[in-house]
Image: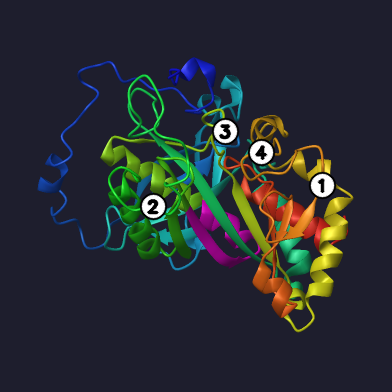
Amino acid sequence: MADVKIEDNPKILSGPVLTNSPNAVLSKTLLSRYNDLPLPADKIIATYIWIDGTGEHLRCKDRTLSFIPKVPKELPIWNFDGSSTGQAEGHNSDTFLIPRAIYKDPFRRGNHILVMCDTYKYNMEPTDSNNRVKCQDSYDRCKDEEPWFGIEQEYILLDSDLRPFGWPPGGFPPPQGPYYCGVGANKVFARDLVEAHYRCCLFAGVPISGTNAEVMPSQWEFQVGPSVGVTAADDLWMARYILHRLAEEYGVIVSFDPKPVQDWNGSGAHTNFSTKKMREDNGIIEIEKAIDKLSKVHMKHIKVYDPRGGKDNERRLTGLHETASINDFSAGVANRASSIRIPRNVAEDKKGYLEDRRPASNCDPYAVVDALMRTCILNE
C-alpha cells in the first residue's frame, strides 16, 4: 500500500505544528486540581475569539470582566497585534476587536463566556478577512424574508504525526463503505471527542442539530442550525473554535482541508438555505427561482466558497466522490453529485429548502451566507 505522506498534500493540516519536543505534552489531569479554586464573585473571564488574516484560522485571548454582559455591545472593544496575525503592518499593528455574539463557556463554565468578534484596522475600516460586515449588511436588507441556514461541517482528525487518526502506519484502511454512520472500533475513531463537542456546543448555546461519522475513517460531520442570517455564521465559527479547543485536550489535530487524502471523499460545508416563501405551500416555485439565479453566477460563488478563491475546491469538486465538477453547475432531486440538491422530501412536499453542496469545509461561512442572500434575495 502507498504511504500517506503530508508532503503529498501540504494543506492537510492548514497550519504549523511542533510535535518533537519532549516538553510539548502536559498532563491532561493536573488542571482539575485548580478548576475548583474560588474566584472573586464579581469577576468573570471572557475569551475573545476572531478570524485571523488567513480568513480560515481562529485566534483567541482572555480578559477579566467585573460584570456579566447581557448583550455584545456591553462588552469593551479590545485590540491585538495584527502584525502577528497577518492583519496589520508592524509599524501600525493595533487591530480592533468588536464583540458580536456571546456564548457560554463550556470549559470554564459558571458565568464565563466566549465572545465571537470581528476585526478592524487602526482606522476602524474592516480588515481584509472581515467578511462579517458585508454579511450583516446583506441580512439587514433582507431580514423580512427570514433567510434560514443550516450548515453541515465536515472535518478530519489527525494524530500528532499528521496521519489521519486511527489509520495504519504506512498505508490505508480498507476501502470506504463501512465507515459512514458506522459503529464499532474498526469503523469509527474518536467518538468520545465528537460526543464532547456535541455537548459543549449545546451548553454554549450553539444550535448544533446533529452529528455523524463520515465516509472516510476519522472524518466526521456536525450540523449547525437552523439559524437566521448572519447568526448562522457566528454559530459555525464558534462551533469550530470549540472543536479546536477540545482537540487540544485530547491531543488530536482538527483539519478542515477540503481534500485531505486523494481518492477518498473530501470535506465540505454543505449549506442548506431557505426563505419564508420557500417554506410556505408551493414554495418549490421560489426554490426553483433561486436555483436559476444561482446557475447564472456559478463561478462567482465558487470564488467565495473557499478562502483561496476556489483553489482549494479544485481538489474536491472533481465530479467524483459525491461532488459535482467545479466547472459545471447542476441541480437535482436527491442527487449528491449535483451543485444544488433538492431533498426528496422537499420535492414531495413542494416546499422547504435547497442544499448548496459547493462550499468547502474551510469556507468562511460569513462569505457563503452573504453570497446566498445577495444572489437569491437581493438579486445582486
Displayed quadrant of residue 90: top right
* 177 on left or right of 98: left
Q: Which residue is mark 4?
A: 320
Instruction: Using the image, determine if residue 99 lies above or below residue 144.
Output: above
Report the residue at 16% width, 43% height from top.
31
* Distance from the alpha carbon under mark 4 to that under mark 1: 15 Å
Give x and y (percent) for residue 325.
Answer: 75, 39
Give x and y (percent) for residue 57.
Answer: 52, 36
Q: Identity of the amino acid at label 3?
A: Lys
Q: Which residues are magenta?
A: 222-236
| Residue 106: in magenta span | no
Q: Secondary structure at mark 4?
A: loop
Tell me if label 4 and label 1 are in contact, CB under 8 Å. no
* Distance from the alpha carbon under mark 3 to that under mark 4: 12 Å
Q: Which residue is mark 2?
A: 182
* Numbered circle sitting on residue 329: 1
If you read the primary sequence from the N terminus, does the residue marked by circle 4 or circle 2 appear first?
Answer: 2
Q: Identity of the amino acid at label 1?
A: Phe
Q: Secondary structure at mark 3?
A: loop
If you read the primary sequence from the N terminus, does the residue marked by circle 3 or circle 1 appear first?
Answer: 3
Q: Identity of the amino acid at label 4?
A: Leu
If you read the primary sequence from the N terminus, does the residue marked by circle 2 or circle 1 appear first?
Answer: 2
Report the residue at 37% width, 58% height from top.
198
If you read the primary sequence from the N terminus, does the residue marked by circle 4 or circle 1 appear first?
Answer: 4
Give x and y (percent) for residue 122.
Answer: 63, 35
If you read the primary sequence from the N terminus, does the residue marked by circle 2 or circle 3 appear first?
Answer: 2
Instruction: State the colouring used for the structure image.
Output: rainbow
